[in-house]
């Protein structure tokens, strides 16, 4: 496939992905109010429990509109992720070997599942705990000079929720990324085990960056990531075990190929049929004698017997010259060819 054909294929996959996103975007914009109600439900439940203003506000004239646009885009991205991943797979799959396709396909199926697991964790467990902790700083007029109540803005709340969902969903892709790196040989389970203490520190730093500045959401992200890291080590060990088993099977096949029970097609002395070791057209059908059969004189003779097409030397020379030795070698040949012809006498 040429470069132009690759670019044409890429354009086709991008067009399908954009079309799917636009369709999902307009569908989600029609349901933006319901999606926003779903996202704000944890905060509403905690506000109803601990008290407060129990309302959302917006301070910019266009804030509510762009909030619905963000909600629609967020919903469309979540819905069309499997479609976009499928288009990416259809683009790269023709360039992969069969074993590479088998290696990547399970991870493509596991990626959206892990993303949903991360999003569900933050929505049903982390967000209620974090909102209850943060709303605990509200006070009444009896506790402070002026009451402290939350007046949440719709845009800020939506940005926080989207950030948490995306952070948990993407961080839950860690086992997929580490296992793929182990399959291609970029790292090993021993490397991950040796770097465990550094990984724990890095996980807590990452959790502090992508989550709100409260201990509940940070720990709620860090602890699952540490568990996923340990699961990645186990997954890498499984990959290495399977690779070792495949290498063992390949070694067994090589041993069977080198067995002495039959001719080795790859060896220099055991070629295919008609080779020096025999076979259907083996050594008995060769017209050239072995060096041992010709003797000392025949060892200096040419490999094939002279024919009538090859001019012969005259017999008038006396003494055992090179031609006489060649004639002696011809007499010892198993294949009695036509007698030498003297071109001077015609006999």
Image (spheres, rainbow, N blue to C red):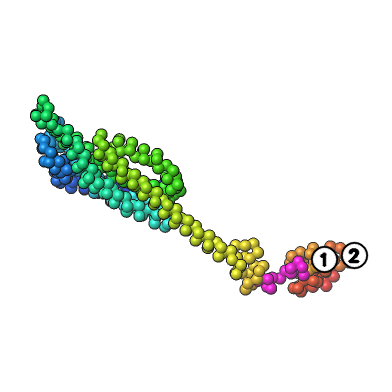
**Left or right: 36 in relation to 274:** left
Q: Position of residue 233 (x, y in %)?
A: 40, 49
Q: Residue furthest top?
A: 145
Using the numbered discs, state the Cα–Cα distance from disc 1 to disc 2 in whole angstroms. 15 Å
Residue at the spot 17% in from the left edge and 43% down from the top edge = 42
Work out whether 239 lies above or below 163. Answer: below
Q: Are marks 1 and 2 in contact (CB under 8 Å)?
A: no
Question: What residue is disc 1 on?
Answer: 297
Residue at the spot 71% in from the left edge and 71% down from the top edge = 287
Q: Which of the 4 quarters of the picture holds residue 220?
A: top left
- Residue range in magenta is 282-293
Question: What residue is disc 2 on?
Answer: 319
Q: Which of the 4 quarters of the picture holds residue 50?
A: top left
**Left or right: 6 in relation to 273:** left
Q: Which of the 4 quarters of the picture holds residue 98?
A: bottom left
Q: Position of residue 183 (x, y in %)?
A: 43, 51
């Amino acid at each position: 496939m040429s470069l132009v054909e690759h670019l044409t294929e890429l354009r086709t996959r991008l067009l399908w992905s954009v079309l799917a996103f636009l369709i999902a975007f307009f569908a989600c914009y029609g349901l933006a109010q319901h999606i926003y109600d779903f996202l704000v439900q944890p905060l509403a439940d905690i506000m109803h429990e601990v008290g407060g203003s129990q309302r959302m506000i917006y301070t910019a004239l266009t804030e509510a509109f762009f909030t619905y646009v963000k909600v629609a885009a967020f919903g469309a991205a979540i819905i069309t992720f499997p479609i976009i991943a499928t288009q990416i797979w259809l683009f790269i799959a023709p360039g992969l070997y069969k074993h590479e396709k088998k290696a990547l396909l399970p991870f493509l199926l596991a990626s959206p599942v892990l993303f949903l697991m991360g999003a569900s964790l933050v929505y049903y467990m982390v967000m209620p705990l974090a909102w209850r902790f943060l709303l605990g700083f509200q006070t009444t007029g009896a506790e402070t000079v002026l009451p402290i109540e939350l007046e949440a803005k719709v845009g800020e709340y939506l940005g926080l929720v989207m950030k948490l969902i995306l952070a948990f969903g993407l961080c839950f892709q860690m086992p997929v990324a580490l296992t793929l790196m182990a399959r291609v040989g970029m790292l090993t389970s021993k490397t991950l085990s040796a770097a465990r203490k550094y990984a724990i520190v890095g996980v807590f730093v990452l959790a502090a960056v992508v989550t709100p500045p409260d201990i509940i959401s940070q720990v709620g992200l860090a602890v699952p990531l540490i568990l996923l890291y340990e699961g990645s080590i186990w997954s890498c060990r499984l990959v290495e075990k399977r690779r070792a088993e495949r290498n063992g099977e390949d070694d067994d096949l090589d041993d069977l190929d080198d067995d002495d029970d039959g001719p080795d097609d790859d060896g220099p002395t055991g070629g295919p049929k008609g080779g020096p070791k025999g076979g259907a057209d083996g050594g008995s059908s060769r017209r050239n004698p072995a060096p041992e059969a010709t003797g000392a004189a025949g060892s200096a003779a040419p490999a094939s017997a002279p024919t009538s097409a090859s001019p012969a030397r005259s017999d008038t020379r006396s003494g055992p010259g090179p031609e006489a030795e060649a004639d002696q070698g011809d007499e010892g040949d198993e294949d009695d060819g036509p007698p030498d012809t003297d071109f001077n006498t015609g006999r």
